[in-house]
Image (tube, helix red, strand yellow):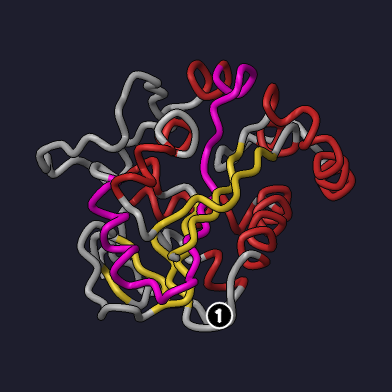
Amino acid sequence: MDIDGRLREFAAVWENKPVLRTIYSHYYQLILKQCRPGPTLEIGGGVGNLKRFAGDILAVDILPAPWLDVVCDAQQLPFAKASFENIVMFDVLHHLANPPDFFREADRILRSGGKLVCLEPAITPVSWVFYNFLHHEAVDMSQDPLQRVAPSGKDPYESNQAIPTLLFGKYQQRFHAIFPNLRVTRTELLSLFAYPLSGGFKKWSLIPQRLVSPMLRLEDRLSPVLGRLLAFRLLAIVTKT
C-alpha cells in the first residue's frame, strides 16, 4: 500500500520520541474518559496511535494506511444511521474544508445520547504566538467555520487552527441553531507547558522525559486558572440530544 510520506515521517517521530508518547497518552486518556460504552469511531486515525492505545476503536482517515479500518472522507461517512455511541477526533476538526458537512454526518451516525469528543488546538494569547509564528499551520481568526465553501480538493493537511476556538466560542450559538440535535455540553482549555516544550511531532524537545509526567499533573491543577491565557489545547464534548 502506498502510504503518504508525511504519515511515515510522523510514525517515525512517534516511535523515537518517548516524550511525545507520554504527552499523547495523557491526551488519549482524557478523550476516552469522556466516551460512553459502545461502538466508537475515530475520525482521522492518522498514524494509528489512538487505535494502539484502545484497540476496540474503528479508525478511519482520508489517507490510506494499513492500520486503518476504513479510508473515507469525514464529510461523507460510509456508515448507517445511529451506528456509534462515540466519535473521537484528535487534531482533525481544524483540517476539514467544510465542518458543517461533517457535523451533519455526526448527527446522522451518532446514537441518541452519543458523544463527539474533540481535542484540538486552542487559540489563546500565548498559544497564538506559538501557532502563528512557530507552527506551519495557519491561524485565521476571521474565518466563519459554519460558512460552507465549494469543494476544492485541497490537501488534507491544509488547515486553520482557529476553527475549533471559533466554533466552540464565538459561533457556538449559531452552531446550536444549525444543528439542534447537537449540543456543546463541555469545553475545557488545557495543555500549558509540556506540549509546546516537547516540540510536538518535531524531532526536537526542550523537556526531559523524567519531567513530563510531573508537568502534566501540574498543568491539570493550573489549567482552570491559567487556561484562558496559556492553553494550547481545547477539549470539546458535543452530545446528540
Vertical placement of 59 versus 26: above or below?
Answer: below
Residue range of the region highlighted in magenta in the rendering = 99-128
| 109 magenta-colored | yes
| 73 magenta-colored | no
Query: Residue 36 at x, y = what percent?
Result: 58, 75
User: With 53 as the anchor, is 56 left or right in this view?
Assistant: left
Q: Residue visible at 28% across and 65% down? A: 64
Query: Residue 12 at x, y = what percent?
Result: 52, 54
Query: Residue 78 at x, y = what percent?
Result: 22, 74
Residue bearing mark 1: 55
Image quadrant where one finds the N terminus: bottom left
Q: In terms of image quadrants, where is residue 234?
A: top right
- Which is more toward the observer, 124 or 204? 124
Secondary structure category for the residue under label 1: loop
Q: Residue visible at 48% across and 66% down? A: 48
Q: Residue visible at 60% across and 58% down? A: 15
Q: In terms of image quadrants, where is residue 123?
A: top right
